[in-house]
């Protein structure tokens, strides 16, 4: 079916099973692939007053518990280019539909540093700013200079400075306040031409040592991150998952001390507004690691990752997640928040 010719082409009743990394069977009543920013602008200009679309990237931070009634816009424009540079840095424009990891490799091949710790995160560039993706002590906000998005109510292009994105821990205005209002079409990254290693987090240092790398390059750090992630995280192509299902909770120092007194081995990290606890530790010590209910499971090696063992529905995964939330609250007095979007 063609909707408002040459603007966007919508298909009816499209399966989303291959478009979410949990591999959940759900349909989009209407679905359009958006490869052209200006076509999206024209569509929003004509339909934005009446339609409230649902924005989809690679579906790697999504739990579908039902079909999607809203028109689904799969944001997929392609292209990467250096827009300006000097001796110290380059400003790189990446279109929203570029696969994130391939983009990181593109920057490293050109000697541009800053994203190496974020290697191998699934999904597309456009979703990166939505939850301020982060890994191994680095967040996208450190390198994201601005974001360009189409206002889906008016069709206007709007540029958001880093400050206007209101980045927080796994958060930005695109994740909650303005969700589905702004379709991010382009992201601009300020990348360095000199490398400054950030290797104190997680196992990067021991991975480099095992590889006998004493003075790592950005590429060495990326390779180390790829190796660690490949060992630790289940591959969605093999077993459905959305990475970490819960955010690491931040609690007051008083609360953290109270828990540490009872559980001396509990992992804790200083945070600007209190103490960050490891959600995986709480889930594991509440006894959930490796458990499975109705095809929905807690990964046997990584308690923070919920998995689809094959027959899970979105509802059974969400039920498992809620059982974990209730139990962790009862046992530790800590509320866990889901990281993926639950629909
Ligand atoms: C194995 C695995 C490991 C992971 N590891 C990490 C990790 O280390 N760190 C981390 O932060 N995340 C991680 N994730 C989560 C996920 O990969 C990221 O959040 C990723 O950025 C999501 O991208 P996506 O394109 O799949 O977005 P989707 O899942 O399609 O969408 C996620 C959200 O962003 C919105 N959105 C998507 N595209 C756009 C756009 N162009 N404009 C506006 N809104 C948009 C959607 O509406 C939705 O609310 C992991 C996931 C998996 C499966």
Image (spheres, rainbow, N blue to C red):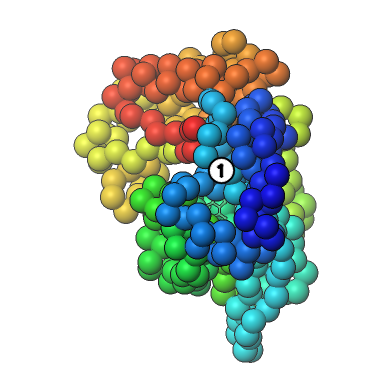
| 298 horizontally vs 332: left or right | right
Q: Furthest-left residue in view?
A: 254
Residue placed most toward the observer, 31 or 190:
31
The 10 Å Cα crowd at callout 1, few under 14, some 14 to 19, many 20 or more, is some
> Which corner quadrant holds the N terminus?
top right
Question: Residue 316 at what x, y percent from top left?
Answer: 54, 17
Look at 64% across and 51% down and name the residue there.
3
Q: Residue furthest top?
A: 294
The x, y position of residue 282, in whole percent, is 43, 26
Residue 300 shown left or right of residue 44 in the figure: right
Residue drawn at point x = 65 percent, y = 67 percent = 94
* Residue 75 higher or lower than 297, as above or below: below
In the rendered picture of this protein, how many numbered marks are placed on residues? 1
- Pick the front one: 337 or 83: 83
Can residue 2 be seen here?
yes
Residue 6, placed above or below residue 146: above
Image location (x, y in percent) of residue 19: 68, 38
CB of residue at label 1: within 8 Å of ligand 1?
A: no
Q: Nearer the viewer, residue 3 or 168?
A: 3
Residue at (44% x, 49% y) in the render: 50
**Residue beneath label 1, please?**
71
Image location of residue 122, percent across then percent down: 66, 46
Q: Nearer the viewer, residue 60 or 77?
A: 77
Say if 261 sits above or below 84 in the image.
above
Give above or below for 100 relative to 22: below
Is residue 218 at all visible to an observer of this figure? no
Residue pictured at 49% horizontal, 22% vertical: 318
Quadrant for residue 323, please give it.
top left
What is the secondary structure assignment of the residue under circle 1?
strand
């Amino acid at each position: 079916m063609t909707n408002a010719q040459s603007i966007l082409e919508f298909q009816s009743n499209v399966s989303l099973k291959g478009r979410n990394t949990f591999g959940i069977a759900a349909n989009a009543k209407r679905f359009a692939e958006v490869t052209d920013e200006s076509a999206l602008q024209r569509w929003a200009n004509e339909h934005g007053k009446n339609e409230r679309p649902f924005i989809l990237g690679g579906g790697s931070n999504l739990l579908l518990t039902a079909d999607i009634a809203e028109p689904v816009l799969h944001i997929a424009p392609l292209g990467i280019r250096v827009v300006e540079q000097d001796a110290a840095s380059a400003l790189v424009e990446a279109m929203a539909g570029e696969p994130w990891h391939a983009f990181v490799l593109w920057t490293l091949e050109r000697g541009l540093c800053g994203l190496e710790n974020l290697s191998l995160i699934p999904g597309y560039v456009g979703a990166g700013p939505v939850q301020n993706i982060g890994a191994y002590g680095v967040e996208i906000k450190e390198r994201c200079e601005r974001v360009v998005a189409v206002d889906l109510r008016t069709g206007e292009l709007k540029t958001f400075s880093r400050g206007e994105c209101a980045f927080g821990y796994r958060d930005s205005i695109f994740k909650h306040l303005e969700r589905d209002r702004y379709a991010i079409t382009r992201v601009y990254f300020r990348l360095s031409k000199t490398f400054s290693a950030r290797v104190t987090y997680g196992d990067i240092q021991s991975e480099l040592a095992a590889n006998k790398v004493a003075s790592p390059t950005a590429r060495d750090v990326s390779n180390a991150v790829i190796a660690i992630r490949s060992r630790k995280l289940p591959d969605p192509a093999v077993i459905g998952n959305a990475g970490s299902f819960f955010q690491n909770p931040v609690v007051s120092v008083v609360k953290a001390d109270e828990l540490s007194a009872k559980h001396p081995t509990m992992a804790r990290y200083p945070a600007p507004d209190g103490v960050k606890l490891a959600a995986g530790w709480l889930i594991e010590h509440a006894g959930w690691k490796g458990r499975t209910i109705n095809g929905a499971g807690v990964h046997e090696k990584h308690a923070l990752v919920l998995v689809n063992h094959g027959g899970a529905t979105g509802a059974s995964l969400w039920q498992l997640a809620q059982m974990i939330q209730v139990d962790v609250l009862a046992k530790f007095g800590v509320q866990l928040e889901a990281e993926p979007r639950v629909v």
